[in-house]
Amino acid sequence: MRDFLKKNSLFLLIVALAIALRLVIIEKVPPALNWDEISHGYNAYSILKTGRDEWGVSLPAIFRAYGDYKLPVYIYLTAVSELIFGLSAFSVRLPSILAGIITVIVSYLLVKKLFNEKAALLSSFLVAIEPWSLFLSRGAFEANLALSFIVSGIYLFILGLEKYKYLPISALLLGLSVWTYNSARIFVPLFLVVLLALYWQELIKIWEKNRRPIVFSLALTLLFLVPMLLQLLSPVGRARYGKVSIIDEGAVVQINEKRASSIYPPILSRLIYNKATFFTKSFIRNYLSHFSFGFLFTKGGTHYQFSVPGHGLIYTINILFFVLGLYHLLTNRTRESFLLLIWFLLSPIPSSLTREAPHALRAITMLPIPMIVSALGFFYFLEKTEKLKVSRGTLTPVYLILLIVFAENYFKTYFLDYRRSYSWAWQYGYKEVVDYAKENYIGYDKIIVTKKYGEPHEFFLFYWSWDPDKYRDDPNLIRFHQSDWYWVDRFDKFYFVNDWEIPKIEGGRWKIESGEEIPVSNKSLLITSPSNYPPGWVLLKTIGFLDGKPAFDILEKN
């Protein structure tokens, strides 16, 4: 044991660092559970308590949720987490935390297998501390769980070429990934083709020696991929992509506007401006944007819940080494180099098929390639500088110190500034709202809550630990489908209203979106956006975001 610890001390320190960075104050950073995390948590709770989701479907293969149809693996693992730790932010985020730690570990094993231990140590260290991998390991992101399945599956595939028993496990993990996150549904089948092409000779030899692991692996692959394809052919399976597709109503409007303003004849205008050409141009632009300097090193993604605004996904100190690493792979012409390069080139495809590209979450299948490439580039740099008689003993400590300085600066921004400045992006304040409503529940006949910050009913269900059967069977429950979304307007004594449905004059009519009128009385509690209420209400409490700006006003009828 002592020899093992001594031999692997650096790696174990990296793993310990990865664990610490992903666990520290996890219930406070990110600052609150957002509506997707809440949905994961409550549906997992419903499965745990009743074997059915919030809609009453027994052990679903896809969760309807708000109408965005979430894949099942993260939710089922969250149910296990909640069984052990209860209904909490920690339980909801734990599968992603563990996935992030596993990705650090397997990145080390993969690079050690493909290249060498020094590159493996630096690669795993970068995966542990780089903004892209760290940020997405702390929220309840299905994408991060899928990534750990993908990286582990690829490693076990390569290991399985020597130790055949690992091939079925590889197939199992890659299969689970396509039932975890939608990007994996495109990337994994494409990359399986790459693995088959690169390692065809080894697979043929395994087939000749022992067919059983190949047969089991094929059976598992088909078991996961065939139902996936069938689901994708259904309206439910296509629902999520329909909400983020390049070709939407806005795209159609743009095409029609270009045709109308075109100087070409109508027939030629239709050939130039149509869905196919619009899609192709958008896809190419989206794809290339994932390799841009700004996305990777300076600005990051545009979505506040997936990266820190104004910060790159990779530390700028690694720009040189990243470029050198790519050059080294391109000129090295080994199978291992081709494997990483093709992985890197295929990974943006899922994100490029959607709007809002480049997208840090949808492009997560790029990980951990930038970290591995940077590590390889650093050692390539050391190799070349040896000719200049520059000591490795000098360059390596200097690089590590600078890397730690960059990391420290990011940690301060993420754990302090980001939490304070962007708590609104995580729908901060709902827990405090629910706590207040729960404490004062008996004193009111009706509790009216604004929908301004998105799906308040789910936050009440989660933070109240509301009994799933009681919720589903509630005679006051009003939920309906509208605009490709499922809305809840009422359950128990709670009414959920849009901000514009709250009257601005005393005596105005109170109605919810489904059309039912709310009989407001002196025993009514109103939880609304700041200053959005008519005369005749008494302000009881204001709940603020972490930057001090008001989030909710809580009032009662005078």
Image: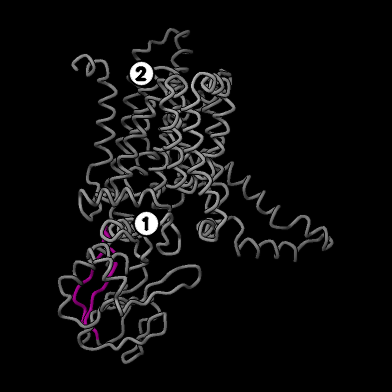
In the displayed structure, 315 sits above or below 223; it is above
In the displayed structure, 233 sits above or below 408; it is below
Q: Are marks 2 and 1 in contact (CB under 8 Å)?
A: no
Q: Which residue is mark 1?
A: 59
Q: Position of residue 352 (x, y in %)?
A: 56, 47
Q: Position of residue 343 (x, y in %)?
A: 53, 32
Q: Quadrant of residue 430?
A: bottom left
Q: Is residue 337 left or right of residue 512?
A: right
Q: Nearer the viewer, residue 453 or 296?
A: 453
Which quadrant, please, contains the C terminus?
A: bottom left
Q: Quadrant of residue 113?
A: top left
Q: Which residues are magenta?
A: 537-556
- Amino acid type assigned to the residue bearing label 1 in the image: Leu
For disc 1, the neighbor class at 10 Å (few under 14, some 14 to 19, many from 20) is: some
Residue at left offset 59%, top offset 27%: 197
Q: Which residue is mark 2?
A: 396
Residue 542 highlighted magenta (yes or no): yes
Secondary structure of the residue carrying tag 2 is helix
For residue 277, the mark is none
Magenta portion: prevailing SS class: strand
Residue at left offset 69%, top offset 61%: 255
Q: Position of residue 33 (x, y in %)?
A: 30, 56
From this viewpoint, which residue is outermost toward the bottom? 507
Q: How many marks?
A: 2
Residue 549 highlighted magenta (yes or no): yes
Q: Nearer the viewer, residue 112 or 201?
A: 201
Quote the CA–CA distance across marks 2 and 1.
52 Å
